[in-house]
Amino acid sequence: MKNCSSYCDMYENKSLLRRYLKSLIHEARLAEYASQFSEYETRIEKVLVMQASLDIQSERLDIMAQGIQEQFRSLFKQLDTPREKDIRQIIDSNGPRNSINNDQVLKRLLQVSGEDTSDHRGIGIETLDATKKNLIRELVEDVEETLRQSSSLLEGKLDILSRQMKDEKEELNNAIDRQGKHIVATLAGGYERIVDPQIQSIWKDMGWKSHAKARQFVLALRDSYLDKGVQTSDKETNGHDYDDEWTLSYFSISYLQAISEAIDDDGSGFITIQEVNAFTKSRPRDWSLLQWLAYWAAGWRSSISIYNTKIHLLLRKIYSLRAKIRLENRQALDLHLCERVFYQLELLLRSTRTLEEEIVISQDLERLRDQYTCQEEKRIHADLQRIAYTIDSSATVSLVTGQGRIERYIYPLIYLLLQDDLEIVQLACKHNIYAEEFEKVEDSMFNVFLAFDARRRDLTAIFQQTHGDLGRKFENYAFGMFENSYKLSLSWAISDSDLQTVWKKFPQESDDGVDENISTDVLKSGVRQPPDFPPPYQFVNEDYDNEFGTIEGLWAGYCTWKDTDASMMSCLGPLIRLNLKKSTGSTTFSGEALFSDKADPVDVRGCLNDAQGTTYGNTLSLELGWIKCSGTLNETCTKITGDWRTSSGTRIVNLRKTDLGRDGNLRLRLFDMK
């Protein structure tokens, strides 16, 4: 059952097109599981038959189990939707690999499946090639290895569930011990169902039934505590005696909204008995209710402010390490930092109103804040470790954070994911790593913001019924955490943010270097072997003259791109190796090029503005297969720089003459080039 659950989990997380590339394999495997379940059912029935001493031939049961796999395969095909039938027909007609390699067929597949090539980047790069690579990787993927990883992830999820169920059971036992005398009353209705005696008394006095307006409830709670002081039933409830006089200062009008939002979990503006009990139940065991209320009045916002600063510092360090990362990892890192999730993160950081400097919380609240923040961070960190920092769905987000609003946990969750990201970036400064390492972080953050956006949509639906000005409501709710997300959903114009300017406000860290003690065990796929050009490694024509002072010979380099948006960073493209030969008595030259991400060489053609090709600033035209650019050759004929325009920006080719020959040491010189 665990294996089947792991396989279904893996299958569900794949896109429609990826599922159908290996539809026969998936159908066979799922039919095999169905057959196994049928066999187990048959065995159980046989045992029951034997025990009941019924005169039924067991061979009949064996016949019923035969052919179950074929039946399920037929059933799977019958359940295909019209879209899925069209995808299956295209793939069956062209073959899986040809369907990917043929651009026209691939575009047709993407159109039919409803998928696009953006890969939720939004950075303006043509990504058909990237989509093609991802689909080919899916095609050659080892299903058994993927299933092994999925099984490991499932085991981690089950560990988290087991721990949560154990905590729930322990909490239930404690609640029964503490509140045994209220069990009968709890089965009734109204205020008797409220567990906390103080709130139960308030609810009864106010004459509320199943719910109360959030503002009225918080005001009544405030008045009750201010009138009666701190003589509460906390000691009777959990056996602790508290000195909570300091908490009363956090019951002023300015903190009422924060307290109301903490209890009103769905944001409806009404507080139900279930929400009251959930709120009081969630407080730490050795805290009084007054301390718990004071924390949500000002302590939580203070913790968000601290996390906001920590996340900015992590981002600053990750960006600063770009200059130190190995060249072969630069493209993956640049594309990683251009992911949409980082834009969403920046909007979250910018829209959240952090605690003003003039507002100082008391030492007592600071102590409680640090205690609870540390406790929650350790819990989330332990759960992330159980699933190897792989958040594969919104459901996994809820599993890791536990019950409650996503806004309660998004800051510590993002902070811990970025810590993992920083470790990967630091390892990328020392080792060649797979781009999939960055994708793991991207996918996890993507699912976190998926849950965040789902919460924003739920709040939007609720606020539309209770508030007129949604923009003003989101500006104030959860300290503005959802404001920019709401504006983005309406395509409102959002001003650009200059992170470099923001980061100058924070103190400069003394250590901006690479941590040498990080273990490569954090890498999902391990360290990658030193990169090499795919076969054939040698050029077709090995006859070349590699003398310096001429354009002829071996060149090595890479492509970058610069977006029309000036704020977008440059990204490294594939590594290039060229073998050029100039035509005798002519300004033209030709040769071939190898790209690190392609198996076959491409033809190279070019033209200089003079026959010698040795003049400083000599302009040239260069064609590298599909790349057609203009550029210059430097004075010593050791460097070529060219560029070409596309709709989304400028592409740049950087080439250098190399004195290395056909041996593999070429890559070592190339990757030292900055």
Image (cartoon, rainbow, N blue to C red):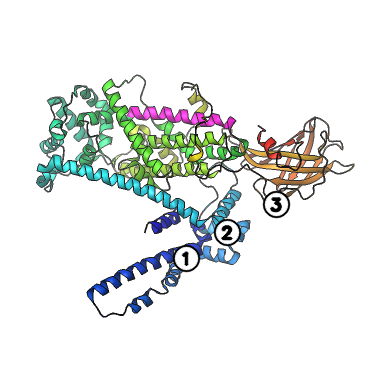
What secondary structure prevails in the magenta region?
helix
Residue denoted by label 2: 108
| Mark toward the start of the polypeptide (2 vs 3) | 2
State how far apart marks 3 and 1 are (Cα): 35 Å
Q: Which residue is mark 1?
A: 28
Name the foreground residue: 435 vs 204: 435
- Which numbered disc, 3 or 1, marks the residue that appears first in the sequence? 1
Residue for point 79% across, 31% down: 617
Discs 2, 3 touching: Cβ within 8 Å = no
Q: Is residue 651 visible?
A: no
Q: Say whether marks 3 and 1 touch (CB < 8 Å).
A: no
User: Residue at 89% across / 43% down in the picture?
Assistant: 584
Q: Which residue is mark 3?
A: 600
Magenta run includes residue 60: no
Asked if 309 appears above or below 214 in the picture, the reply is: above
Location of residue 482 (image quadrant): top left
Mark 2 Cα shell of 10 Å, populated few (<14), some (14-19), many (≥20): some
Residue stretch rendered in magenta on the structure: 301-325
At label 1, the amino acid type is Ala
